[in-house]
Amino acid sequence: MKPTVLMIEDDPQIRRFLRATLAAEGYAFLEALTAEDGISQAESRRPDLILLDLGLPDVDGLEVIRRVRESSQVPIIILSARGQEKDKVGALDLGADDYVAKPFAVNELLARIRAALRRSSTLGNDSGQVFRFGDVEVDLASRVVKASEEEVHLTPNEYRLLQVFIKHPGKVLTQRQLLNEVWGPNNTEQAQYLRVYVAQLRRKLERDPARPKHLHTEPGVGYRLVVEA
């Protein structure tokens, strides 16, 4: 079956453009002009992915994320002209999967959609699987990590941080989300922890830590594990 994308957007030109683009790529397309209609369709139509504008005429898009997340983990990609970091961080902290600023490159958006759908389809898989990206192989059952076929020793915190990235491949994770999952809710303002541990993971797992292909920094927001690079 075709994956179904629900777009919650009040701009008719963007809706028309993405309706044609996504249909050509094999997606089924639903659309809503308001937040309330979008929330209703998210509940009743059960789309595989939501594209969401933050600047809606009736309710702010952040409230849409909050209400959808009460009952669903459907991937949500923000499409918004709001380019400030606080808007990105706010949307991602509420549970959005990704953020694409307008104007956007259509090929980049399509790649983000594919990545979000892949991530969604792998959630709940058996924890004994082996996860791979680039030259790195992580056996989640035995907790063995290899890079270029050589076993790599990770500290407990390094491994926990890597586990969080593996749980959400391709998803932008804010500093607050990562700190909360690895170090707990009392350390969500300790950004220096992340900088140190991400740098250590890059030294151990990336071929060129100065130009990482997989552990990407999202400036002012957080980090993303890029699996295909």
Image: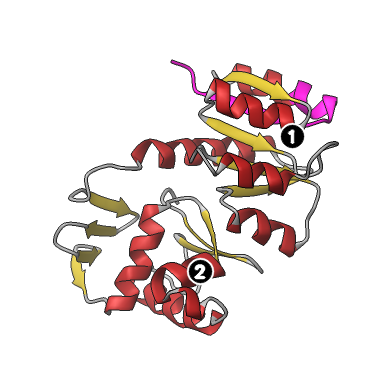
Q: Position of residue 195 (x, y in %)?
A: 51, 79
- Dot 1, crowdedness within 10 Å: few (<14), some or many (≥20)? many
Q: Nearer the viewer, residue 199 or 78?
A: 78
Say which label, 1 or 2, has the lower sequence index: 1
Helix, strand or loop status at disc 2 = loop
Q: Position of residue 95 (x, y in %)?
A: 56, 51
The residue that label 2 is drawn on is: 211
**Residue type at numbered disc 1:** Ala
Up-down: is 170 above or below 202? above
Find residue 69 and report its image quarter.
top right
Count of picture labels? 2
The residue that label 1 is drawn on is: 35
Q: Position of residue 131 (x, y in %)?
A: 27, 52
The answer to whether the residues at label 1 and label 2 have Cβ atoms under 8 Å apart is no
Instruction: Indicate left or right for 14 with 142 as reference.
Output: right
Q: Position of residue 30 (x, y in %)?
A: 64, 20
Stretch of the chain drawn in magenta: 1-17
